[in-house]
Image: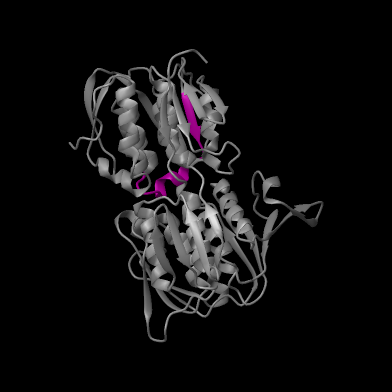
Amino acid sequence: MNSISHIILNAPSSKSMSHRAMLMAGLAQGESILSNVLDSDDLTHTRMCLEAMGAQFDSSGSRLVVKGLGGKVSAAPGQVVGLDVGESGTTCRLIAGIAAAGKGSFKISGRGRMHQRPIKSLADALMPFNIIFSYQEAHGCPPVIIETQGLPGGELSISLEESSQYLSGILLGSIMAEDEMVINLTGSKVVSWPYVNLTLQVMDEFGCGPEIQVEESGKWVSVSASQVKEAKPGKIRFIVRPLTVAGRDYQVEGDFSNASYLLAAGALGPRPTMVTGLNPQSRQGDRVILDILQKMGARVEISNKGVLVEGARLKGVDLDMGASPDLVPTVAVLASQARGITKITNVAHLRIKESDRLEGVFNEVSRTGCKCSMLDDGLIIDPEGFESDREIKFSTYDDHRMAMSLSLYQLTGINVVLDNPDCVKKSFPGFWDEWSKVVSGMGKAEGGKAEG
């Protein structure tokens, strides 16, 4: 890379890994000490749900001390344990799998679009075990009361066409089953598979990883999680043998999803950015942002100091982003600054995120003058018509990823005004502190956090 000095930025802790580490520590026997756990609204709700179930938490500096449940989740007779998941889809679906494996009645509720986000596929998979999901409002969505006497063991099938979180919730709950659980995948496709890989990683590190088997020539063959690059329905299954997990010390790695905005800033701005705290060998699916940046023409350099990204003339690309949907808003902004057309496909599941993120990205990128079109499962972005040197009032849809990605337009000559900049607290409370380093380092006027 050239000699232009770079801006040093810090990646936040991984939200996905923080959820999973906190849940495993909450289920474990004894005490766990978690380091570098993300402090965000979503993680607050995961902690609240575990506390409602009986786990105990104590914050000690940058560490979180967790006294777990020892694999016993229950509600007293006649009591309904309330589980407030806020706007966190991850909390909702993972905690539902855990609650379903407990004993008693549990009510899952949230706010915002949470009561429109589906959970029916999880309920359908658990129905053969006499686990009852009673929907209080819209059928198939929270708020929902789960009545259960636990998982006795046996075989079940789950579709991951909407979300991989259904499988993650069942995997976590299955360690509390009375006997061995065999989990099969059904449906026509699997979305967001890398997030299941993160669940498997944390379970492995807590000593309760399932046996993974794939079908080869009509026989089931055991493989490691690292050997599974994609999951095909009917061709893979998971065998979970119940056990009591022991508490342990655990450090959460940096988050590639939230680092994507900081990395993209290096590709768009006049100065490179170096992002520290990332694990280049991470199993996080959104690590693919490094490959996407390179494919679009940016220069990426990985060293023991961090990940350095330097801009170049970006070019349009064709991308299947089914495994990394959270990166779509970031990539869409980059595409609007590229030379040539970018086509993003296989992301229909973006419609059931915190907002209809597919329509939201289309609407907001279109405000810049780009010629965008929406597909059933993606977007086509033609940068022709982009206009800078003006103020644009962007809508965030109360969606953290929309707010952070749209802030990148500040590096293109647009005066960015967001209607709800504080929604970043959902996953990256320190975003505006890091972003201030970007805009000052790039020689841009402070802004981007103003409310319209």
Q: Nearer the viewer, residue 277 or 42?
A: 277
Looking at the rendered image, the quarter that the C terminus falls into is top left
Q: Residue furthest front?
A: 61
**In the rendered view, how is the structure colored?**
one colour
Residue 233 in view (yes/no): yes
Which region shows up in magenta?
A: 342-356
Total marks drawn? 0
Tell me where residue 419 appears, x and y as whole percent.
22, 39
Identify the residue shown where x is 29% and y is 24%.
Answer: 440
Tell me where residue 328 appears, x and y as whole percent.
44, 36
Q: Is residue 408 left or right of residue 129?
A: left
The answer to whether residue 452 is above or below residue 4 is below
Residue 268 lies in what quarter of the image? top left
Q: Nearer the viewer, residue 105 or 444?
A: 444
The answer to whether residue 82 is above or below residue 442 is below
Identify the residue shown where x is 38% and y is 54%.
Answer: 42
Q: Residue furthest left?
A: 452
Residue 87 inside the magenta-drawn segment: no
Tell me where residue 141 appears, x and y as whole percent.
39, 62
Identify the residue shown where x is 64% and y is 71%.
Answer: 242
Q: Is residue 232 left or right of residue 329?
A: right
Residue 139 in view (yes/no): no
Q: Is residue 397 left or right of residue 88?
A: left
Q: Residue furthest bottom?
A: 77
Identify the residue shown where x is 64% and y is 49%.
Answer: 231
The answer to whether residue 245 is above or below residue 338 is below
The answer to whether residue 302 is above or below residue 210 is above
Q: Nearer the viewer, residue 240 or 325?
A: 240
Residue 352 inside the magenta-drawn segment: yes
Tell me where residue 284 appears, x and y as whole percent.
55, 43
